[in-house]
Image (spheres, helix red, strand yellow):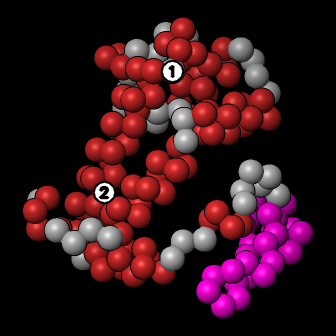
Amino acid sequence: MRMLTSAGVLVGFCGDGGTPLLMATEVEWLSPQSEYRPTKYLQGWMQFWFYENKRLQAAKILQQQRIKFLKRIWTKDRDLRDQGFQLENALIKDALILPWAFISAKEKSTEQEFRQQCLQAFTDHRALEFMFHQLKDLSLKKDWEQHQ
């Protein structure tokens, strides 16, 4: 178990109702109670996952949301603006990790400092909450034919 968690593998065992009985991880900011999701999201996800056209629609929706997130972050984050990241000149890849990779390389940050900065940026901009919200919405989507 320790070898798995030290390799970054999240291991959890659940009892009735999804309540964690044991959670083994070395990721300090990961709280097992906040990571449980009701089964309705998995059930909703499975309703489109096996259909290629719906999977493509889901990918397009996620990519559009990702671009909106990037625009929101890059226009309001002063640290990124101060480092010269401008939306009109930016390759649309990642809103947070990509610019901090460049900044960390420029500042000769250690790998640990880079990871800390990325985690801080994710926390500051609530990136995980944003991604979970998008996946929850997508898994409960019913109007697939309307977004082709």
| Residue found 66% across the figure and 14% down from its top | 106
Q: Report x, y in % for residue 31.
A: 72, 60
| Residue found 40% across the figure and 15% down from its top | 86
Q: Quadrant of the N terminus?
A: bottom right
Q: Amino acid at mark 1?
A: Asp
Foreground of the two, 125 or 117 = 125
Among the 4 quarters of the image, the one containing residue 122: top right
Residue 124 belongs to the span the image colors magenta: no
Q: CA distance from mark 2 to mark 1?
A: 26 Å
Tell whether 121 sits left or right of 130: right
Disc 2 marks which residue? 59
Rendered image: mark on residue 77: 1
Q: Is residue 30 above or below residue 117?
A: below
Q: Quadrant of the C terminus?
A: bottom left
Q: Residue furthest right?
A: 2
Q: Could one spot residue 136 in this view of the protein?
A: yes
Q: Amino acid at mark 2?
A: Ala
Circle 1 packing at 10 Å, graded few (<14), some (14-19), many (20+), is: some
Q: Could one spot residue 7 in this view of the protein?
A: no
Tell whether 42 sits left or right of 47: right
Residue 20 belongs to the span the image colors magenta: yes
Q: Is residue 5 above or below residue 124?
A: below
Element under label 2? Answer: helix
Q: Report x, y in % for residue 82.
A: 54, 8
Element under label 1? Answer: loop
Q: Marks 2 and 1: which is nearer the front? A: 1
**Contact between labelled residues 1 and 2, with CB atoms less than 8 Å apart:** no
Foreground of the two, 18 or 54 = 18
| Residue found 80% across the figure and 63% down from its top | 25
Q: Report x, y in % for residue 72.
A: 39, 29
> Magenta region: which residues?
1-25
Among the 4 quarters of the image, the one containing residue 24: bottom right
